Amino acid sequence: MISHDGQHHLRAAAIVLLILLFVCSNSHFSAQAFQLQLRDVGFLRGVENKCALLNHNLIETRQIRSENIGRNEGRIRTRSATKLGSASSAIEEGNREEEQQGSAGKADPKAPQVFATGYSNDPDLHTALQQAVNSALAALPAPDPDAPSDGVGIDLAFVTASSLYNASPATIVPAVLGMASVYGSGIDKLVGCTSGGMISSVVKASDGDGADSAAGVSQRGRDSSGNSEDAAAVRECIPLETEGILGVSVTLALLPDVKVSTFHVLSDDVPDDVGRITSREWNNAVGLTGYAGTDDERAEVPVFLLLPSPGFQSDLGELLHGLSVHHPNASIIGGIASTVSSLSRAQLFRYDAAEPNAQNILGDGLVGVVMNGDIQVETMLAQGAKPVGGIYRVVSGQESTIGAIMLDEEATKEDDDAADALAGEEEEDDSEGEMDAKAMARAAYSKAAIPKPVLAEANYLMKALGDEEQSFMRKTILVGLERGGVVGRTPNELARLAEGEGHRFAVHQVASAGMKDGSVTLPLGSVNVEKGTRFRFFVREGDFARKEVDALWTGYKKSSLASTFDGGEALPSPSACMILSTIDRGSKLFGGKPGLESGKVSEYLPMVPSIFGLKANGVLGKLDGNASGNVDTMVHGSAASYVIFRSKSNRPVYSTRQVESNAAKKSAERREESDDDISELPSRSLAAFDPTNEAAPRDEDGELVLRRREVHSGRAISVSTVEWSVADKMAKPTSALEGAMWDKETEVDRFRERVPLSNLVSQCKLYNLDPSKPKPRDFIGQLKHAAQDGAFVIIPECKRTEPTLGSLRRRYDVAKLVKGLTIAGAPALCVNCDPVVFGGSLEDITTAREAANKAAAEGVSSDYSFDEGIVVPPIIASDLILYPYQLYKLRLAGADAVRLVAAALESKDLLYLTKIAQSLKMQAILSVASEKQITSITSLSPGSISAVVVSNRELEDFSFDETGEKALSLLCSDSLKEFLAVHDVPVFVEGRVGIISREDERGNESAANYIKELKEAGAFGAFVGGGLADRNKDNVNDSWKALIHDTELAAR
């Protein structure tokens, strides 16, 4: 046994040894120390043990596999399902270990604090948002199954988007809300803004065998810091940093026990009588109605994230002053919204479920969010300013004006000695020219040991500086004032930062200068100048700024290790790091490619799950994040703020990488588990398929092997608002199509129980005999009429959701869409009425027909009308049709034609269904996705098929071929030529038409070029659904006109 004194001495020796190791190799040691600290399995035990049940629901609603990297939404979701399954297994195993160790009496593990970030640089805004949201959703854990249904959701979303996108920024918030709605109750609060550059991250994936690079696995590629991925392999996420290009970043946060409030304040709302009003009155004035005042903050220390517009800067000082008075203990962070070009206007984003009708795209004012509860932040700020010349003392000045300064020789010598010592440690070789400059500067200092006007000393100092520094000082004068409470600490700026002591000087830009007296004035209200305060000149310099970033993070790591091994409690693990950096940093300041700052964060915080932020016009924050209060919070130019988020109660950190690694190790056991052990929950959008990484089974021709549901079996599904749940006796579906077929079979079974087929047949006979009932219209005839001039025909498709994208519109109003399309002159309409995958209903067919009739009755003109008058566009019903029962229901609903999926039907079923359709006077359009399917429909009788549709959709996971090559290859195939030799019918295309772009011979890229290729390959027209919503969700007329314009360009 070691005595108490012996333990004390051993601890002291360990601390000394660790500090020595840190000096020798700070980054490598610290990374390993943090890795050992955070890779403990305990951090995975923060999710409830019951999440396995809800895990399968999340798999059903969100996970789609894809092997094509261009279809990454599906792949990300599948990976998420695998991670979540592994998380459940790891958590259960961890809990069993705790019980074996006698820890059953402990409190239940806390839910994790989670930040999940996704990024995309897709040139299409909607696609970029979808990819970014999907990536972020894939990194979230399963919601707590014990929580109420209306309480499980995303507490806060932070969205940044490049200002270069042509699409209206007004679509960003509704799109993100709709796309994230698959996660519980969706997003509760959202803030964000446009940005001149993106700071984001993506999840660092483990290798397929579960081992990562920490185990010696080497990967090619480079992260944003320029380091090879071998060095970054043990990192939880890979940082991404861009400047001046298209991009979207979405961060979704789960914040247990944190109250989140958002607010929007305009310039006129900021009180100017801060000291004469109560905290409640001030809160109400700035939009924080009902928010707790300072009494509740003494222990809570709320976090304010502020996103001002550029036009709000003149009032920002007054707002910060109000926060310092009425919320003195708050942590304040933020950045001013920016744009790539000064010609565009920055926009702010805000959504609050408590104010659903509030405007969510804002051009003026400030958007903010306050987080109060189990959350804390630690901030560091890099000023990017290099000290030049000596250290002075203020001789005269008042308020924010400095009149005269005098050299402080003792402080200057102390700083020089520290700088020389630091340079010696770094083994830097100063050139003779640099030494001469130092000698000249010292000579200048001796002459300046008398009070002199600030401008006079600045002009004298410039003579001793290099060309670049002189050029900078001629344009901008930066001055630093020593901060209080720093006497006796390390004098040199970089050395102080490396010791974790914070900045010595707060740098300010001179707002104005007195030409007569040589005084300088700082921004009004930014500082109150006191006589005797130390003063220094600064310039912007890239090499120093790089060293400053290194010193900041070295000091952070040193302070963290010292705290951990000095008998104190270790800091809670960081759940995210936010970088707020001004747009003039990055490649402009540091040189080379963007990514130095985000790369440093990843290097020093290798296990942080999320890195996100924005490139701002200015940064809000304190120089020393450890200082109490927020009195020195101000706006910093050319600066970067690093904000580390943590929980106060040391909640576990959800590790996507660790979950994925565990998933690979345990996939074999999970595949062997009985399917009867887990009761499946209803699917909201897409029937689930096997969540493992195995591909769906295919025959020798490459076709999916599809099994029909066993008799008397079924699965839990949702049909409209009715939930059906029946035990399933067979294995899970192996593809999205197979799962959708099983759900459709169950749906039809339930309908049959209520209305037998014989009743439907009788109703159809009576319907056809009734002269008041509408008769089926010629769907193909109308399309041929529209194409008389050789035009490429567009058939708009109305559908609520898309399996790989989620909701296409925030509000799906069939009547409004149909009316708009009728007004625009659509020759025909496709209405998707499938409730399982696409969120439709049979009532949509009836509603669409009535809306089109009403539009025609009101005298709406149409470009596609016969001589006898206005013709209402005929309607084709799109559904997964497996039984004649469905055809009868569609006829009664008012469909003029039906679309059949050839892959889901055997030859005898195709023959039977096409004959039934003919008997009901409905035209049958067949959809094919392979040459074998084309061959299978060639044997049908001529006249039984009215048209064929070649699809860009992959039926294994319902994703699309984003290149468009699949449809082109089918159009040019021999199988289609043989089919057309028997069936003289038009050929259409579906899947991303109007979205996929191609380059022409001159290098111009557009959607019209792809349409032209389709037309030249023999396509008669296309069914377009997502392409309409993608162009303009709010105005279907404009979307239609844009598509028609593309077809006209393609015809030239």
Image (spheres, rainbow, N blue to C red):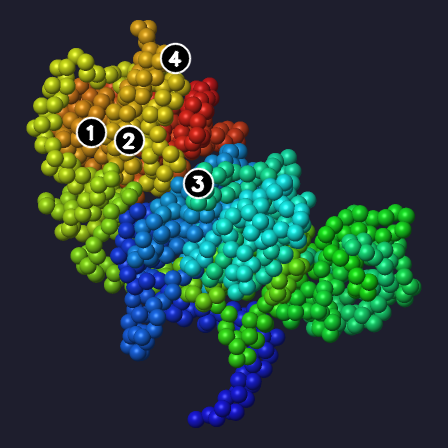
Q: Looking at the image, is mark 1 or mark 2 earlier in the sequence?
A: 2
Q: Looking at the image, is mark 3 or mark 1 earlier in the sequence?
A: 3
Residue linked to disc 3: 356
Q: Looking at the image, is mark 3 or mark 4 earlier in the sequence?
A: 3
Q: Amino acid at mark 3?
A: Pro
Quarter-wise, where is residue 529 in the image?
bottom right
Q: Nearer the viewer, residue 267 or 32?
A: 267
Specify the label residue 832 is tagged with: 2
Say which of marks 3 and 2 sits in front: 3
Q: Residue pushed farthest top?
A: 868
Point out residue 374 in the picture as x, y percentages from the top left corner. Answer: 46, 62
- CA gap between label 4 and label 2 equals 25 Å
Q: Are marks 4 and 2 in contact (CB under 8 Å)?
A: no
Point out residue 510 in the picture as x, y percentages from the top left corner. Answer: 77, 51
Specify the label residue 90 is tagged with: none
Q: How many residues crowd around disc 3 within 10 Å: few (fewer than 14), some, or many (20 or more)?
A: few
Q: Residue at x 52, y 65 (%)?
A: 299
- CA gap between label 3 and label 4 equals 37 Å
Judge from the rendering whether residue 319 lies leftward or rightward of residue 253; answer left or right: right
- CA gap between label 3 and label 1 equals 50 Å
Q: Is residue 404 above or below residue 924?
A: below
